Image (cartoon, grey):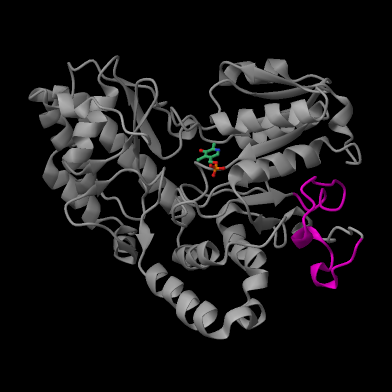
Amino acid sequence: MNLSIAAAEALDEADALAEMKGRFILPEGVIYLGGNSLGALPKHVNQRVSQTLASEWGADLLRSWNSAGWVDLPRTVASKLERVIGAAPGSVAVTDSTSVNLFKVLAAALDKTTTAGVGNRRKILTERNNFPTDNYIAEGLIRLTGDRHELIRIDTPAAILPELDEDVALLMLTHVNYLNGYRHDMAALNAAAHRVGALVIWDLAHSAGAMPLDLTAANVDFAVGCTYKYLNGGPGAPGYLYVAPHHIGNCQQPLSGWFAHETPFEFSPDYQPAGDIRQFLCGTPPVLSMAALDQALDVWADVDLSALQEKSLDLADYFIGLIEKKCAGHNLTIITPRERKLRGSQVSLTHPDGAYAMMSALIAAGVIGDFRSPNILRFGFAPLYIGFVDVWQAVDRFAHILEMRIWDRPQFHTRKTVT
Ligand SMILES: *Cc1c(COP(=O)(O)O)cnc(C)c1O
C-alpha cells in the first residue's frame, strides 16, 4: 500500500463517490470521523425543517396533519429506508427510539400467539459486549414478564453457534459491534437459529447506511436501528423497526398506543391493532425530526451501496496501514478485525491509559472521533463524505499528537459527560 499523500490524492481522484461530499454541510478544517455516532448534516435539511416550521406548522397549523402528510410520515419515511436495508415494501416503520423499538419487537417475538410459539422457551441469547441499551431493555422485559426468560450473555462470536439449542427463544444481536466493529454473518446465524426453531432480532445501528443489507434474502425475523448514525437523520432522530411480512399480524407488541390502532381517528373505546406494520407504532410522530430525516434519506436515492461498502473498507484499510506506519511504538492496539468480511465501517484502537486524552487532543486538533469506556478510540468512516486525504491528514495529526505527547497535557484528561 502506497501511504504517501500523493497516493491518497490519487485515490480520491479515482473515487466515484467523492462528489457525494457536496451533499453535506461540513465545517471547514474539521475531519469528521464521528459519522458512526452522529452523521453529518445533509444540505437540504435546513431548508426542509424551515419549511415545516414556517408554512406547515406556522401557517397551515393542524391542517398539516393531512395537507402536508404529517400523519403518514412513519410510513413515507420508512419506504425510503426500505431500499437502503433491503426490506420488502410495508415491512418497516420509522418511530420511537431504537431502545423502545427493541422492546416492542422483543415482546412481539416472545408473544405466545406467534406462529413460532417461541415464548415457551427459556433463553434469549445475546453478546456480553452488545450495546448496553439492548441488554438493559431485554432484562427489563424479562423482569416485567415474571422472569420466564433468561438473558444469556455470550463472550465471543464463535461461541454463539454452540449455544443454540431447542431452549433458545431468541437470538438478539447487533450486526456490527459498536466497540470493535466486528460484523456477524447475518444470513448464516439466521439459518442456524431457525434450524433450532428460534427467532432472531438484529440491531442495525452500525450497519444501515454503511453497507448493502438484504433483510429479505437473509431471512431476518425482526430488526431495529437508529437513523442518526450513518443515515444522517440528526441528533435524536427517530429509530425504525422491521418485521418480516410473515410475522406481521401473527404477533402483538405491547405498547398498543392509538397510532397502532386500525382506525385511530375513530377514537374507539376498543383496541383493534392495524392489520399492517402500523401496528408497531405507538403515539404521535415527532414531526420536526421526521421532516429532517425524510430529507436526509433523499441522499440515498442513487447511492450504490456495494460501492459504498468497498470504499468504507478501503478507507479503513488505508487508516490501519497509516496507523501501523506512523503511530507505531505508542502502545496502540487495533481491535477491529482485519478481514474485510468481519467488519463494518469503523476502526477501533485501544490504549491502556491514554485513550480518552488522545481522543480529546485529536478533537482539539480538528479530528473528531469518539472515546468508549474504558480504553477505546473509535474512528468511523462514513464513505459519503470522507475521503482518503481526510484519512491521511487525520493520522498525520494523530502522529504529531503522539510524538509530542500533546495528549498528556492536563486539559485533555478531564472527562466530559458525553464521550
Ligand atoms: C446507537 C445504538 C443504539 C441507540 O439506541 P437509542 O435508543 O437511539 O438511544 C442502540 N443500539 C445500538 C447497537 C447502538 O449502536
In this rendering, the answer to whether 25 lies above or below 230 is: below
In this rendering, the answer to whether 163 lies above or below 309 is: above
In this rendering, the answer to whether 92 lies above or below 130 is: below
Residue 364: x %, y % from top left: 18, 39
| Image region (quadrant) for ligand 1 | top right
Number of marks in picture: 0
Q: Quadrant of the C terminus?
A: top left
Residue at left 38%, top 20%? 374
Residue at left 58%, top 52%? 85
- Left or right side of 415 for 149: right
Q: Nearer the viewer, residue 196 or 258?
A: 258
Residue 201: x %, y % from top left: 69, 37
Residue at left 37%, top 44%? 312
- Left or right side of 406 for 197: right
Q: Is residue 49 visible?
A: yes
Q: Is residue 86 magenta?
A: no
Residue 81: quadrant of the picture: bottom right
Residue 188: x %, y % from top left: 66, 32
Q: Main secondary structure of the magenta part?
A: loop
Q: Which residues are magenta?
A: 244-269
Q: Residue furthest left?
A: 404
Q: Quadrant of the N terminus?
A: top left
- Left or right side of 119 for 347: left
Residue 108: quadrant of the picture: top right
Q: Is residue 248 magenta?
A: yes
